[in-house]
Amino acid sequence: MAKNLVIVESPSKIKTIKKFLGNNYDVTASNGHIRDLPKSTLGVDIDNDYEPKYITIRGKGDKLAELKRLVKKADKVYLATDPDREGEAIAWHLAQALKLDEKKMRRITFNEITKNAVKESLKNSRDIDLNLVDAQQTRRILDRMVGYRISPVLWAKVKRGLSAGRVQSVALRMICDREEEIDAFIPDEYWTLDAVISAEGIRKPFEAKFYGTKDGKVEIEDKNHLNKILGDVNKADFTVSEVKMGERVKKAPVPFITSTLQQEASKVLNFATQKTMRIAQQLYEGVDIKGQGTIGLITYLRTDSVRIADEADAMAKEFIKDTYGENFVAQTEGVAKKTGKIQDAHEAIRPTNVSLTPALVKEDLTRDQFKLYQLIWKRFVASRMESAKYETTSVKFSAGDYVFTSSASKVSFEGFMSVYTESDDEKEENISGLHDLKKGDKVNIESIEGKQHFTQAPAHYTEATLVKSLEEKGIGRPSTYAPTITTILARRYVAKENKNLYVTELGEAVNKIMKIAFPVIVDCNFTANLESLLDGIGEGEVQWKSVVRNFYPDLNEAVVNAENELEKVDIRDEETDVICEECGRNMVIKYGPHGRFLACPGFPECKNTKPYLEKIGVLCPKCGKDIVLKKTKKGRKYYGCESNPECDFMSWQKPIGEKCPECGSYMVEKGSKKVCSDEQCGYVTDNK
């Protein structure tokens, strides 16, 4: 019998796929890429029209030799690397490195590792898609150009070991821009007025919120305005002026794509993006299920399409009909709002077999695998179900000329919510009996209270919200979100505390240089446009070399200018008045992975180091000693007293040594303003 060889990327797929194909097929793995650009040089021949110079990756020689032996024995070779651009490129590199005869070689892809999908892929084998290869090759070359040309500039101007990246530098800028917004944010005061009402027939008192007057909505401007409203309301009777009954529909969510899975896993399961992708990869490649062997539990995890195969859709609806009832099956399909170009070659992320419920496979999965599988399974099943329906009641109360409102809702049909609710769904308020109120009914005021509030600064990015923003702006693609975040954290440009991402001193220095010397590289619109061009290459509409030809000369010019004109961030060690207690020399400021520290200039004879505490010229409002600039263990800046832990003073904003003229609290600097540190006071003035 003829012998066929199937080459996959990951060794963990071999056992599963071999089981589906039988003895006529050999299955082996390339263990990812076989060839790449060399690490020691740019690897792109600038003088020869940007031709890439590929070499066998160090350590892959034995693997390549093994593959060559297996190829010689085979009558046909199927390249079954992952079904995305990078997988297509790996297949092409394998074909080149193994010198495969085109008549002997075929490319197959499957979106899920199941018997039907693998066998179907063999029936639909094809040639390697060179457009997809060119798209991935262009991404790799552009990333290499940015990294290998700009990183040496950062080494020379800041410190060795830093790096720049086409997507990572934009992500860093977004985080830095958000930090600047937060630092410059000045809170605005606003007031609310809430009444607690009781009425006959309603068991518990409920809340009604101030709306305005009969003429429309009114904002409460300040305390004086609030007191006037309170005075008028207290003299008036509260009566029901309007009761509206209605119905509200909540549509089922669409299935997960890469970015939404990462976001929801972060919010619900507290998984980092990298962890989500690692566990999803395990579920995709296959898990041993008792009585069934190794099974791929989910479809391919790198996708930006919400499309579902007709067969999977039909199976899901049949499952829902049998499990929940006919009326729970979706009659129309939910549609996601599209942002930019969608690579619709893949499906959304879904279970490969909807009848394998989380409960059935729980014993065979690790705790984290179970949590993620359950999330994916529930979201997919919910996406094939009917919308949830609510009965709503909205009541307006009159108090003289003023209007208060109260509303309630209760679920009349659970629909998809019987299976799945999203992490940011608000709890519905169900006030029993509110719908029994009639126009003209009098109600009793149990209490009424006005509250002062202040608008909140924009939230710090989390991994989830950064992924969402990257996707919305069209920066990067499903395969790049997790590596991008991992890189900026590993380089210590960004620190993560309680899910929030904070820029470090090192990150600020790198971002400043990038904005000054390479403004185009860190421009969100430019990077998003480049992604569109890569999509165009993948679709055969754009020539890959034309993109590189237009990109490199401008990059090269910017690098040359930066090398000649950019000032070094830290030209020499700055001497301090701190005396080294071991040898008596004046200690100097050095830069390390975590930022600045004090070191003895007598190194290596004297190796004494200590934390660097930068005085800001302001005295502590608690104890009168100097305030110094400090950093958390993860690199986030704050201001504290030099006598800590004896004095516990700390501030995230920079104190300026002035007292608030209204309340006496210390003042801080926020952008161009001086702001009272006591939010309840809210005093603000220009920082002149």
Image (tube, helix red, strand yellow):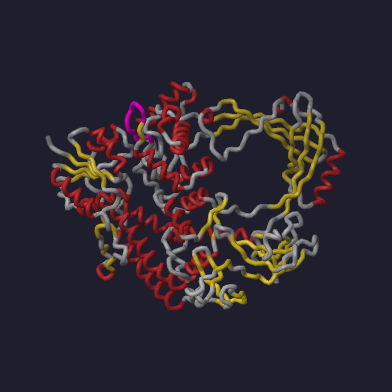
Could you tell me if residue 334 is visible in this image? Answer: no
**Quadrant of the drawing holding the N terminus:** top left
| Left or right for 69, reference 471 | left
| Left or right for 175, reference 531 | right
**Quadrant of the drawing holding the C terminus:** bottom right
The percent position of residue 397, horizontal first and vertical second, equals 76, 35
> What's the residue at 27%, 58% (across, down)?
58
The percent position of residue 474, horizontal first and vertical second, equals 44, 53
Q: Quadrant of residue 447?
A: top right
> What's the residue at 52%, 43% (across, down)?
270
Residue extending farthest right? 235
Magenta region, residue range: 289-297
Instruction: Pick the residue in front: 300 or 606.
Output: 606
Instruction: Pick the residue in front: 357 or 251.
Output: 357
Q: Quadrant of residue 363?
A: top left
Is residue 293 rendered magenta in the image? yes
* Total numbered labels placed on residues in the image: 0
| Left or right for 539, reference 375 | left
Residue extending farthest left? 1
Instruction: Pick the residue in front: 426 or 437.
Output: 426
The percent position of residue 419, horizontal first and vertical second, equals 51, 29
Could you tell me if residue 370 is visible in this image? Answer: yes
Instruction: Pick the residue in front: 177 or 497.
Output: 497
622 shown above or below 446: below
184 shown above or below 118: below
The percent position of residue 435, horizontal first and vertical second, equals 70, 27
> What's the residue at 83%, 40% (across, down)?
233
Is residue 575 rendered magenta in the image? no
> What's the residue at 70%, 26% (across, down)?
432
